[in-house]
Image: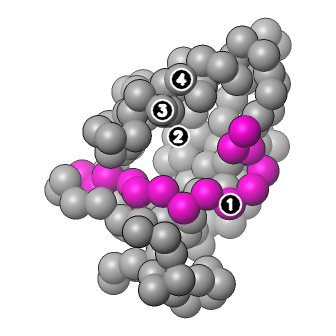
């Protein structure tokens, strides 16, 4: 699959058009604690903060309706829920690829805080909006 990120130094996940997780890499498990057994074939909302789920569902539905992206191919700073229930602020870079009549999405995440923060992310947590 061309959509799968080649950069295994950062966490990534692959999601289908219904929001079900198709794949994660080992780095995703290391940083966020989720394993393939936890997430594969599960809806990605498990890693979304409660406060963001409605917005995510609305944006996802709108994209499927009109095909216009409001979030693809540029960095977004969002919270990611870890398996232990904590949240890590991460920069997400989301791409999409059309497969037959549906879409597949890949997100590469760069942790911006905590033990797994990447100094090369270009931003410190002090520079981020609250």
Regarding mark 1 in the picture, which secondary structure is present there? loop
Regarding mark 4 in the picture, which secondary structure is present there? helix
- Residue 79 is one of the magenta-drawn residues: yes
Question: Residue 114 sits in which quadrant?
Answer: bottom left
Quadrant containing the N terminus in the rendered view? top right
Q: Are marks 3 and 1 in contact (CB under 8 Å)?
A: no
Tell me which colouring the rendered structure shows: one colour
- Residue 13 is one of the magenta-drawn residues: no
For the record, the magenta segment spans 70-83
Q: Are marks 4 and 3 in contact (CB under 8 Å)?
A: yes
Q: Earlier in the sequence, mark 4 or mark 1?
A: 4
Q: Earlier in the sequence, mark 2 or mark 3?
A: 2
CA gap, disc 2 and disc 4: 23 Å
The disc label shown at residue 58, or none: 4
44 with respect to 16 (left or right): left
Q: Earlier in the sequence, mark 2 or mark 1?
A: 2
Q: Earlier in the sequence, mark 2 or mark 4?
A: 2
CA gap, disc 3 and disc 1: 17 Å
Q: Residue at x 80, y 27 (%)?
A: 68
CA gap, disc 2 and disc 3: 23 Å
Regarding mark 2 in the picture, which secondary structure is present there? strand
């Amino acid at each position: 699959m061309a959509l799968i990120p080649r950069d295994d130094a950062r966490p990534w996940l692959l999601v289908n058009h219904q929001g079900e997780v198709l794949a994660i890499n080992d780095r995703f498990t290391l940083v966020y604690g989720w394993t393939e057994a936890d997430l594969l074939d599960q809806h990605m909302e498990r890693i979304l903060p409660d406060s963001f789920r409605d917005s995510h569902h609305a944006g996802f539905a709108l994209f499927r309706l009109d095909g216009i992206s409001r979030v693809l191919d540029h960095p977004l700073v969002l919270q990611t829920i870890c398996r232990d229930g904590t949240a890590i602020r991460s920069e997400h870079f989301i791409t999409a690829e059309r497969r037959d009549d549906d879409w597949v999405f890949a997100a590469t995440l760069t942790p911006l805080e905590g033990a797994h923060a990447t100094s090369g992310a270009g931003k410190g947590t002090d520079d981020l909006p609250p």
